[in-house]
Image (cartoon, rainbow, N blue to C red):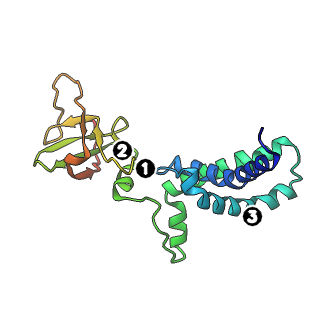
Amino acid sequence: MLELASLEHAILAVALLSPGFLLLFGRSQFLTGRIKGVASGSLEYLMVSSIYYALAFPIYKSSGGEGYFSLLIFLLIGPLGLGLLLGFMSQKNWLRSALGWFGLNLVHHTPTGWDHAFGGRVGEYWVVVNLHSGGVFYGVWGGDSLASSDLSRRDIFIEDVRTRDFQPVEKDGRKRSVWISEVDIRSIEIIKDNQDVKG
């Protein structure tokens, strides 16, 4: 049977790490990359939890927080909601822009140029994928296209392959798609056109 002391330690560990984990999990929903596992990220979770507790506990106490519902908000909904908000703000670069007004330059939240190019891309764009073999793919980057967010694998799926002058490949209205492996990609050009990309 589980000893009471070890159960208390487990509950304490969850209480110390869970707000940080939930906050960073919520933030990661808007940013590329993977959230760290508990073993490798426990120090980061503890640090974020400490900051969260320092900021949220006075609000929790001053609001007369008692009962299960207020505890649920304090320990679960609060950190997750704050993480989602911070992730959305990071994706939109609002915090970075605001600090820029004061002459401060934060380290960019996006770990690679690949993630910056594809992580928050909305709308449709022309893409030109240059291959190591010398071949070139032209196409439309839209909602059905995909660039891997896995740091160990950088493949790409283009939803609508086009000719060199960006005309449809298929003349009967069908779309042709292509998946390109990371080992084949030399460079990718992303072109935002003022005219309708689907045209």
Q: Is residue 145 left or right of residue 107?
A: left
Q: Under tag 2, what secondary structure?
A: loop
Query: Of 152 and 40, which appears nearest the observer?
Result: 40
Q: Residue at x 82, y 41 (%)?
A: 69
Q: CA distance from mark 3 to mark 1?
A: 31 Å
Label 2 sits on residue: 148
Q: Under tag 1, what secondary structure?
A: loop
Q: Which label sits in the foreground, 1 or 2? A: 2
Asked whether residue 156 is in view, the answer is yes
The tag earlier along the polypeptide, 1 or 2, is 1
Instruction: Give the class, few, some or many, for how many residues have Cα within 10 Å of label 2's Cα (few <14, many ≥20).
Output: some
Quarter of the picture containing the C terminus is top left
Query: Of 25 and 9, which appears nearest the observer?
Result: 9
Label 1 sits on residue: 120
Rendered view: 115 above or below 143: below
Measured as percent of width and height from the top left, residue 121 is found at: 39, 48
Label 3 sits on residue: 54
Measured as percent of width and height from the top left, residue 105 is found at: 48, 73
